[in-house]
């Protein structure tokens, strides 16, 4: 509870001892933060727009129907498939899906439990790659997307096995 005030006092004291103008450094850091936001904003907006188009166009439903034979073999319930597809794309979108799953299947259902484990244990792959690679200007992600998606599939299978 007192961590933030103590931390601020330590920063100001350390700056005073080192003879650094803490306020000017704070303003410079805030300026750098705005520049970072300026750099990544186009990537984020493009990704969010693409996700929205993906969901509203019905492509998500087609993808779920396409993946069902494979996910049935893996034991992933159909009610969790939207979470499986959206989680790598958007954290807030998957949170909305988790709410829908809990509302439709019940909080104690297998679908809700699997979705909750997936929500807490998987990453928003494309968001993370967009931000990190966008900030440093990397356009060729090489194997990062493929390995991340493969990891997502494995994490989802483990989540399903943990809940069952």
Image (spheres, grey):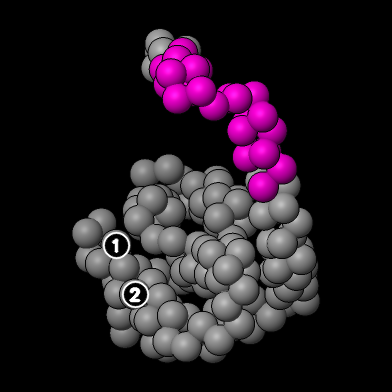
- Separation of marks 2 and 1 at Cα, in angstroms: 12 Å
| Residue 149 left/right relative to 43 | left
Element under label 2? Answer: helix
Provide the residue designation for mark 1. Answer: 159
For image coordinates 67% across by 54% down, the residue present is 36
Q: Which residues are magenta?
A: 9-32
Q: Which residue is located at x 58 percent, y 68 percent? A: 136
Q: Residue at x 54, y 26 (%)?
A: 20
Q: Within the image, what quadrant is residue 65 found in? A: bottom right
Q: Is residue 71 above or below residue 95?
A: below
Left or right: 60 as drawn, with respect to 102: right
The image quadrant of residue 29 is top right
Q: Please, what is the dominant secondary structure of the magenta stretch?
A: helix
Residue at position x 70%, y 68% in the image:
43
Circle 1 residues within 10 Å: few <14, some 14–19, many ≥20:
many
Q: In the rendered structure, are the residues bearing label 2 and label 1 in contact, judged by CB atoms less than 8 Å apart?
A: no
Q: Which residue is mark 2?
A: 151
* N-terminal label among 2 and 1: 2
**Looking at the image, residue 118 lies above or below residue 86:** above
């Amino acid at each position: 509870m007192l961590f933030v005030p103590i931390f601020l006092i330590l920063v100001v004291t350390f700056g005073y001892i080192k003879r650094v103008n803490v306020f000017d450094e704070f303003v410079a850091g805030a300026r750098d933060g705005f520049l970072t936001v300026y750099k990544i904003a186009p990537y984020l907006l493009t990704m969010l727009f693409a996700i929205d188009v993906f969901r509203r166009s019905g492509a998500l439903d087609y993808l779920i129907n396409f993946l069902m034979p494979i996910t049935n073999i893996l034991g992933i319930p159909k009610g969790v498939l939207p979470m499986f597809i959206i989680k790598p794309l958007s954290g807030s979108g998957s949170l909305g899906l988790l709410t829908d799953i809990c509302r439709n299947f019940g909080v104690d259902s297998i679908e809700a439990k699997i979705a909750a484990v997936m929500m807490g244990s998987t990453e928003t792959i494309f968001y993370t790659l967009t931000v990190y690679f966008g900030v440093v200007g990397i356009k060729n992600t090489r194997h990062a997307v493929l390995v991340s998606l493969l990891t997502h599939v494995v994490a989802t299978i483990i989540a399903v096995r943990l809940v069952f």
